[in-house]
Image: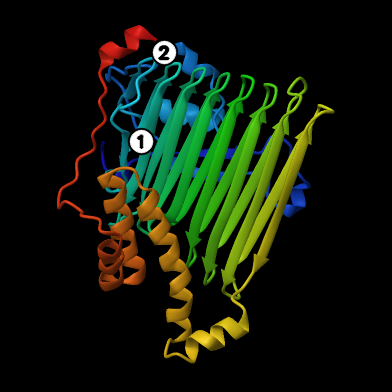
Amino acid sequence: MADNAKTEPTVTLERVNTPPAQTWNYLKTNDITLTVPRLSRKGDVYFALPRLFDRVETGMGPKVTDWVTSQAADATYVEVRAGEKNHAPIVVDVDSNAGTVSDTGVMVRHDADATVVVVSHGADDAERTSAALVRIVVEAGAHLRLVEVVAEGDAHQHLESVGISADEGATVDVRQFFLGAGTTAAGICCALKGDDARIDLQSHYLGQGTQVLDINHVVRMVGKNGRADVRESGILNDAAHKTLRATIDLVHGGSGSKGNEIESVLVNGDDVVNKTMPVILCDEDDVQGNHGATIGSVDPQQMDYLMGRGLSRDQAQDLFVRALFDDALIEAAHPLARKAVFDRASAVLGQEVARDLIDTLGIELPADTEPTAPTTREDASNA
């Protein structure tokens, strides 16, 4: 991929990452506008995903989907065969230092298990834009584990748009870790189309300095007796700016479904801007929906206790950040993801603390970690 820091012209993506139901415009939580590079792909031969992926709704919306498909050098298709339980992790490697724009489609056939790891990493000082578009179809009775790690430098802008379609009895587990980038815009939409489908989405984020995080979570509960648990937690320091839109849509016909959403935010800065828009949409009688958000800072008594034992205020606050990185290392499902978390922890907490995290968990990081995404174009003919 060419160095897009030198690329002209640019294009403006207006009103992306929008929720299904918008609030009053003056609150300025309905969307985000992004300026992204536009590369010339004249003469390139682009491998398109099977058409069924066009019907998968994504979190950031069609404008981002169209931009990614026009900018990605190629598309990657992976199929996990029916009943397969030991498929190697499917890794989407997004190198922000190279300005990677990635388009990936995954088909998890019925009764199979699959792990998808999306890793966005890089730490140079150039202003670059990277992006990942991931669309996944989970057939009946299949299980998907999706791990997303964004660990980039403060000069980088990253877009991550995910769409998941889950059929009857499918189970989806999502773990998101937004650990750093100048601007992170991420959206995920999961449609529980079949009866008894489930999703457990846990999102964790860290914002510091003047970083911007814009997150959109959408769960469409279409089938009967669906279950959705959406939990977000994060730490905002300094003058970080975060907007979260979380929508559980209880669609007509999805009787017996239950959806829960809760967010907790720890604020450690007088100039932090935190906006949260939790929404329950309901067009069915026999359903349950709950949502909420809490925001607070470290209890003064807890801070005094820690400082009374020799910690400075910054060191005490770093304990909470360390816990976030600790969780990310535990949940990371591939060496490339762990390496990205380690590198970001080194930048935020220092090399000594990052190494201590690795040693405590007993994790070994190879010097050169290569993604292992078993993908072939021939697989697309099976879709």
Q: Where is residue 355 in the image (x, y as percent from the top left)?
A: 25, 66
Quadrant occupied by the C terminus: top left
Q: Which badge, 2 or 1, comes first in the chain's sequence?
A: 2
Please say if 298 is above or below 107. Answer: below
> Who's the residue at 61% across and 53% down the image?
243
Quadrant in which residue 95 is drawn: top left
Nearer to us in this view, 160 or 4 = 160
User: What is the spatial separation of the Cα atoms under label 2 and label 1, in whole angstroms?
Assistant: 19 Å
Please say if 182 is above or below 168. Answer: below
Nearer to us in this view, 45 or 215 = 215
> Who's the residue at 43% across and 30% down the image?
134
Q: Where is residue 229 in the image (x, y as percent from the top left)?
A: 62, 41
Q: Mark 1 points at which residue?
A: 101
Q: Mark 2 points at which residue?
A: 50
Q: Position of residue 37 (x, y in %)?
A: 40, 40
Quadrant in which residue 48 is drawn: top left
Q: Could you tell me if the residues under marks 2 and 1 are in contact, i.e. CB atoms within 8 Å?
A: no
Residue situated furthest right in the rendering: 285
